[in-house]
Image: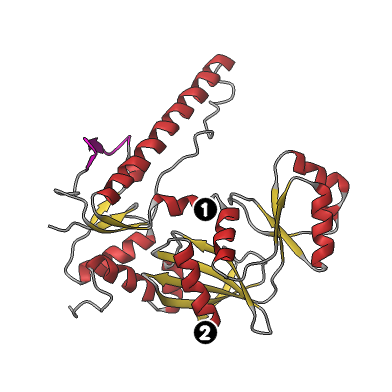
Amino acid sequence: MERWGIIGPPGDEQVARVASYLRECRAEPAILDLSRFPAEASLSLLDGLPVAPGLGAGPEGPWYVRSLPLPLPFLSCHGEAGTATAGEQESARRSAYANGRELRSFVFSFVAALERGGALLVNPPSTFGQHFLKLEQLQRLRDAAVPVPRTLATNDPAAVVDFARSIGGPIVYKPIAGGALCRRATEDDLLPERLRLLAGAPVLFQEEVPGRNLRVYVVAGKVVASYEIVSDELDYRGAETAVFPAPPSEEEHDACLRAAEACEMVFTGIDIRRRDDGTFALLECNPSPMFAAIERRTGESGVTRALGELLLGSMEPCPPG
């Protein structure tokens, strides 16, 4: 019998909305909360077969993967200052490193086993890795003839100065692996003493694309929702002043479908900047975008419905209750 469900915490608003839609369709989803593993939940791989409460006899069918607890191995605790000796703190760091590495390895293997067993993962762990490989994703988009901003990633101060000169207008910078807001580079940022900080780590620089913010959602090769997000900030995350439905242009629509295919994402939220002259650039394809807050704000449910119908094996609405 086909088994399908959701991977993510039940309290996550995206998970809750999709689960609620499925229940309205008289289908009770299996919800696999990997964040409770290993302290509060038991998971096993028995000769390559994933075993978990609620998983049933097999993992076949589609699974909406909202989140994967994949800690970076080099992140570790430092102990409580004043309560642990240097040796105890070092031991705690080593233990945290080892535990994080084991957790990461098991979770990757467990979810990969679901996929090998016939599950369609929406999306698989390989696409989640694009969160930390922005340069690789940008190249995928270029190869698919998708317009993206001119980009430089470097630790070379002279290269940054030359790049800014070649752009001839505002540039922005952000972490290569994500984790912080995008910022506009100021004149002070281009001074030698500031650029010397690149000796610590490279940074991603891009031409700033002025215009309107669009978030386009693609599910199973279809654009299912699109919104304009108004904000006074360069990076609108957490600073939205208005959100309303806004269909993409034909060119944006086609570029989004090519982008989703190039990034191998069954489900993605795509960020676009549309210039006043109608030209545009894609900034990023997110493998697990948030959508619940936008749907609450607009009263729409296109993304929830599309994900629910994908899990049910149909892109047609479920029968009315």
Residue 261 visible somewhere in the drawing: yes
* Disc 2 crowd, CA 10 A, few/some/many (<14, 14-19, 20+): few
Label 1 SS: helix
Residue at 60 percent across and 66 percent down: it is 236
The residue nearer to you, when weighing 292 against 191, is 191
Is residue 76 toward the left or the right of residue 266 in the image?
Answer: right
Does residue 216 appear anywhere in the picture? no
Can you identify the residue that label 1 sits on? 131
Is the residue marked by circle 1 packed among few (<14), some (14-19), or many (20+) residues within 10 Å?
many
Q: Where 282 falls versus 136 (above or below)? A: below
Q: Check the picture and name the quadrant holding the C terminus.
A: bottom left
User: What is the chief secondary structure element of the magenta stretch?
Assistant: loop
255 versus 203 height, above or below:
below
Q: Amino acid at mark 1?
A: His
x and y percentages locating residue 143 in the rendered image = 56, 64
- Report helix, strand or loop for mark 2: helix
Q: Which residues are magenta?
A: 38-50
Looking at the picture, how far across and down is residue 267, in whole percent? 40, 65
Identify the disc placed on residue 250. 2
Locate residue 54, reporting x and y percent: 18, 49
